[in-house]
Amino acid sequence: MFDTEGDEWSTALWEGSMASGAQFGGPPPTTPAGDAGNNFLSNLLDVPLDAEGAKRVNEGAQQFKALAEGGGFSINEAGFEHYRKVCDTFIDGYNSISRDLHVLSLAAQMGGSDYAKQVSNFNVKVAVSDHESLVPNLELLSEGFKQVREALEIARKNYRETEDAHSQTFAKLRGSE
């Protein structure tokens, strides 16, 4: 489903730090326990299709966004572009089928027999009847990917601000020599 451009995905250049102090560059490091942002990103492609999995992705995305908003996560442009592409692929794919998903909420005219009506009603139930159904879980996943996308924007801003601060510090140090 996602084009990760060969091995580039696993070797996306990351720089910055998470709240735990993990440093990024080259292949993703082994994540220390409690490193929520890195754990979340490393499992981003493992998209669940069940209600519990969709809920976990959405909750993880909320925590990930809060981590970025709190300044606990930053990402360089190369890393941002790789993860943005994954998020946009899911979001764009979901948006392109959303009208078709709406059709699933309508009972198909399958005939007048009791069995035909049962099958038609079952199809609607599977698609949209409750939080265990396909459409609500796809909507939840889409919202989660949107939050991840927002978190990545914030994390990229965090990275740029850190880079600017370091550049100013180095410029001052060079000026005092």
Image: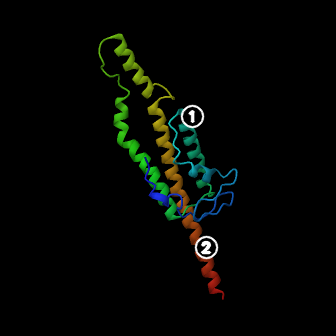
> Mark 1 Cα within 10 Å, few/some/many (few <14, many 20+)?
few
> Disc 2 designates what residue?
166
Q: Residue at x 58, y 41 (%)?
A: 59
What residue appears at the point 35 percent right and 22 percent down from the top-left corner?
Answer: 107
Identify the residue at horizontal 66%, vertical 60% (top origin).
22
Identify the residue at the far top of this view.
114
Name the quadrant containing residue 74.
bottom right
Q: Secondary structure at mark 1?
A: helix
Label 1 near label 2: C-beta < 8 Å? no
Q: Quadrant of the C terminus?
A: bottom right
In this view, the residue in front, 1 or 104, is: 1
How many residues crowd around disc 2 within 10 Å: few (fewer than 14), some, or many (20 or more)? few
Q: Please tell me which of labels 2 and 1 falls first in the chain.
A: 1
Q: Position of residue 133 (x, y in %)?
A: 47, 29
Type of the residue with mark 2: His
Outermost residue on the bottom side: it is 177
Residue in the image at 55% along x and 42% along y: 57
Q: Amino acid at mark 1?
A: Glu
Q: Which mark is residue 141?
A: none
Q: Calculate the distance from the C-alpha at mark 2 to the C-alpha at mark 1.
A: 42 Å
Where is residue 169 shown, x and y percent of the image? 63, 77
Secondary structure of the residue carrying numbered label 2 = helix
Number of residue marks:
2
For residue 127, above or below residue 111: below
Vertical placement of 115 versus 59: above or below? above
Spot occupied by residue 72 in the image (x, y as percentages of width and height)? 63, 57
Q: Residue 99 vs residue 15: left or right?
A: left
Q: Is residue 134 left or right of residue 37?
A: left
